Amino acid sequence: MLTEVLQQVINGLVMGSTYALTAVGLTMIFGMMRVVNFTHGEFYMLGGFFAFQLTASLHLNYYVSVVVAILAVMAVGFVCERVLLAPLRGKSIDTTVLVTIGLSIFLQNLALLWWGPTPKSIPLPFSNTPLQWGPVVLTWSRILAVSITFGLIVLVHLLIQKSLLGKAMRATFQEKDAALLAGVDVERIYAFTFTLGAGLAAGAGVLLGSIFLIYPSMGNIAILKAFIVVILGGMGNFIGAICGGLILGVTEGLGAGFVSSGYKDAIGFVLVILILMFRPSGLFGKARRL
Amino acid sequence: MAERDRLGRKTTAGGAWATRTVFGVLLLAAFLVPLALRGYWVRLLANVFMFGILAQGVNIIAGYCGYLALGNILFFGLGAYVTAVLMTHFGVPFPVAFAASGAGAVIFSAGIGLLILRLKGQYFLMATLALSELMREVISSLDITGGGRGLTLPMFTGGAATVNNFFYYLMLLLMLACTFCIWLIDRSYLGLAFKAIKFDEDAASVMGINPPPYKTAAWAISSLFTGFAGSAFAYWMGYIDPGVVFEITPSIKMYLMMVLGGAGTVWGPVAGALFIELVSELAWSRFMEYQFLIVGSILILTCLFTPKGLMDLVGKKFTWSLFTKGIRENKI
Amino acid sequence: MTEPREKLELLTVRDLDAGYGDAQILWGVSLGIAQGEIVGLLGGNGAGKTTLLNIISGLNSPKTGSIHYLGEEITHVNTYNRVRSGITQIPEGRQLFPGLTVRQNLLLGSFSLADKSRVPEELDFVFDLFPILSERQKQLAGTLSGGEQQMCALGRGLMSNPKLILVDELSLGLAPVAVERIVEALKKVYREKSLSILVVEQDVHLCLELSTTAYVLETGHIVKQGPSEELAKDPQIRKSYLGI
Amino acid sequence: MKGMIGIVVIVFSLVVLGCGSAGAQEAIKIGIIEPLTGPAAYDGQSVVEGARLAEEEINARGGVLGKQIRLVVEDGKADPAESVNAAEKLLVRDQVPVIMGAWASSATLAVMPVMKKNATPLLVETATSLKVTDPPSEWVYRICSNSAIDGQLMEKYLVPTLGFKKAAFMAANNDFGRAVVTFWSEAVKKKGGTVVLTEYHAPGEINFAPSLTKISTSGADSIIITSDIQTASNIIKQTYEMGLTKIKRLVTNGIPSEAIVKLAGVEASEGVLVHNYWVPFAPPKGQEAKNKQFMDKYTAKYPNKPVDKYAAFGYDGIRVIAQAIVTARAADPVKIKEALKKTKVDGLTGNIQFDDKNQARPYSSVSRIEKGKPKLVVRLN
């Protein structure tokens, strides 16, 4: 019983950390730009497919592929932001939402045409035999995913906290007009934020794609989870997204293990509705009026 | 002789005679279609009308009130399941189940609406999305709904033509009822209140409007028609499962129709539904694989360039400034 | 409870404290508006004028203190119910519904009227007051000029047949001619409709000219109050506000 | 308003134009409804490709009743509403005397009433739901298997031969998954085995660690996996990663072994049992030559695509229909329906002849994946 709990918690933490990675990008874009980005799932999917293309077809080194795939998706994100979102800056939120939905449909079906509906698997450079530590089983790909996830999160955190660009980002987040007056090029900050967010989604896509499989509609479930995490942690809350991801991962694991796997996905949605109704700023945010 | 409605507007404009005639002819044509055309086309049009109802449903809550209820498909699924459960497990006749579906959708939306309609913008959108996913999960796991197995409804008695005609007229009448309802709202203080809420809730309350009941009313009306459509759909298809009636694609499609036809207008969403469904059927059947690419592109282009709907472009010269104007005036 | 007064008190504000989060904006503010009186509220930027106005109209809520209207406490009454009982705010920066037509904006003003049969009458009154609005009825409010927007906002406020109108920064960003035009209209309304008006204004000349009683608000405190004529002579006010 | 009416007029006239475009054709038309777009498109296309091979072959031999046959393919998207639309289109616009389809069970169930009302037969090629032939409809014939038949066939092998004494199920939460659980559970229980655990998953689920952890502590000696290709492969991959390789793993309902090996990896798929319908390496006895011919032709025509059971069922389906048209001596729906009852075809997917519920009994087998290659373990009939 105890080993089962332990194993379920570990399973949950592995899943949860990738949820967190996807959600961090989403929450950043939301907090900074007030854009609910439905394309996030497609950036996640593209990350997986680019990595697949690089490793399986071009036989590039796996780790190099991961980096190149992330950069490539960042480029896609940058173009999307400049062409589609920049003109709508300051316009109705509803419009931007619909545009990102349109873009998501577009990219998903483009991937379907390009790569076809059959799932793909990314060739890994190491053997994925289970590693047994006492009662707990893990694999190298999962350990790698968790470490890269936390590496990326720490990197982004440092970027935001320490760098000049990060300071400009925080200033824009807190008070856009003041930042403008202080000489911050807000447009550039927006473009950078969106690009970075896309890159984080792609990172999650590559890592989860290495554990599971890659297919054009893989972003659908990823974005639902990311939305749940973002709401749990509070929209725009960086630390909240990380904690929210881990919490969702673990509750799902334990819920599926000890309640019923039929209601596994329902747990997240119930949490979302409760949080939105009673604590709309998220579990970790200060209560504020929306 | 010009009459005036409650808001003091003229109900008949001077040059509206021709418009009225064309409109009457179209309506008459719509009623006569089943006499002239056979199964497939009648079915296709019935499907168009169904999407017309769904688009009008989001029009009330999103187009008029400005609340992006992205998970509105929830009421479609709910209506479908209320009908299916009542008809299969309790042997209830269709008309009763149909009424119950509408009532169920309204009760659910009003109850949940009081709780979540205080959320604004993207928060509300997330809540409706989460609700529709939650409903799908719950229905997939309940025994009475057959779980993921789905339900097979009692068959409609009668030949192929009778079935098609029945659902054609049912959907047509529902769509007309829904549009009539919106027409009434559009010319009343209720519609004015909805529009005021859409632009600014604080400003609306300075006008003496208490937003929550109005928003709840809007969502209830929206869910009523969406629920009816779901009920009719279930009986029409004869078999439903959670994947079919809670799918997200129609949810997005109905937004596309509303935006394309003109959000917050009386006939816009219906025109949008006609346009999207018929054009996709007639022109895109050759480019089957590309059809969702096209749907996505149209959604993006509409939002960017003609946020007030396609009608806004009719009769205007296509110039670049018109497009940039679209971006400037964006508000759906 | 209320101490006897010469004039019938319409609105009484007592000991209001208010603020956002840790920042306190109003400190123990009290003021009174009698029936048929124009009261002026003076103060510089950030003095807390708009906050006070929003508390009276119900858009913001105070931390402590009370508001009485027609002898009843309304401190916790919702904005829309205050509108129904006759308190109408003409918000700063006009705040029309830019996507609705002038006519629709005006009609929204009559939303709180229980008896909608009076609407045409009220509409005619507003059109009489501002004939330009009648010409522009079908135009979107967002396309009006600043002065016209202010007229529309004022007209919209009048549509609810109010007992008390709260006018926030009437002259802000308007040409002097337009201000004059609107002030004239306001005076006319005051004469014909016998209502009370609270004018919040940065333009001290205008404020003191229009009002009978005035209050001076500085960093959240009422620092002076009295008949407008007297305040206009007050040397301190002349110095700090009128620049004399 | 005027503009809107303009658009409505245009659209209506398009409708009218569209109606009049159906012309007369010499060939005998056979309608096909398959998912050509969406997640099931790959499999749907396989069916169509198999069907096209049969079409070519039959036409090369001179067609049927002296006429060529022509397949009219419509996209049903594996969606009930779309499939019904496709059926209506085929019946009304093309006036086809018989249809093959509609791939998914939900789509097929939705199409069935339409077929009945238009008095036209439907040949079901891949939909496995029990409801398709139970209660039977005189207009619906099925050449693929269903879970009741599979369960019955597996009874002899599951516990006695394969040793599934304490079985756990991991199944998709849909009609198909639940039906397999019902009938295969019976098969286990009838031979003295027990079902330790049943875990349903939502379509599209990717993370099975919670369910597998539960199974590993439940004492199950075997897992029976019922889902689509990617989900089943994912589960296999994760059983390996969780160190559950000592537990016997069986994948039901003809998921191709090559796909499992490719997606889950050679290591993870070692020892996995696969329940097959048509497979390239083990055709029914007596069909070896025919099978090779079919495989060669298919590979020549579609070089980049491995042959799968869907192609085989598509191929057999058209052969059955052609045979029935010959027996009926006319391309008439009612006559074809009657003829189908008597039709016998030695197909790649088994000896096809319909029982009193219009259900054929296709051939099936169990194989084991060893070093990435499937090895036949047992033929089931």
Image (tube, rainbow, N blue to C red):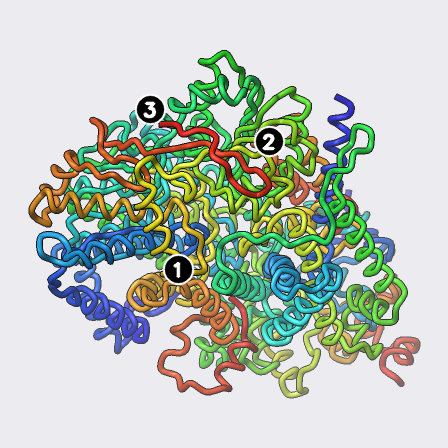
Which residue is tagged 3?
B90
Q: Residue at x 84, y 63 (%)?
A: A160
Which quadrant holds residue A157? bottom right
**Which of labels 1 and 2 is toward the front?**
1
Which residue is tagged 1?
D302
- Specify the amino acid type for callout 1: Tyr
Q: CA distance from mark 3 to mark 1?
A: 52 Å
Callouts 1 and 2 close, C-beta under 8 Å: no
Secondary element at tag 2: helix
Do discs 1 and 2 share a chain?
Answer: no
Which of the pair A203/B149 is nearer the observer?
A203
x and y, in percent, of residue D109 in the image = 31, 38
Q: Residues within 10 Å of mark 2 (few under 14, many from 20)?
A: many
x and y, in percent, of residue A74 in the image = 69, 68
Q: Which of the labelled discs sits on residue C73, or is there none?
A: none
Secondary element at tag 3: loop
Q: Residues within 10 Å of mark 1 (few under 14, many from 20)?
A: few
Which quadrant holds residue D216? top right
Do discs 3 and 1 share a chain?
Answer: no
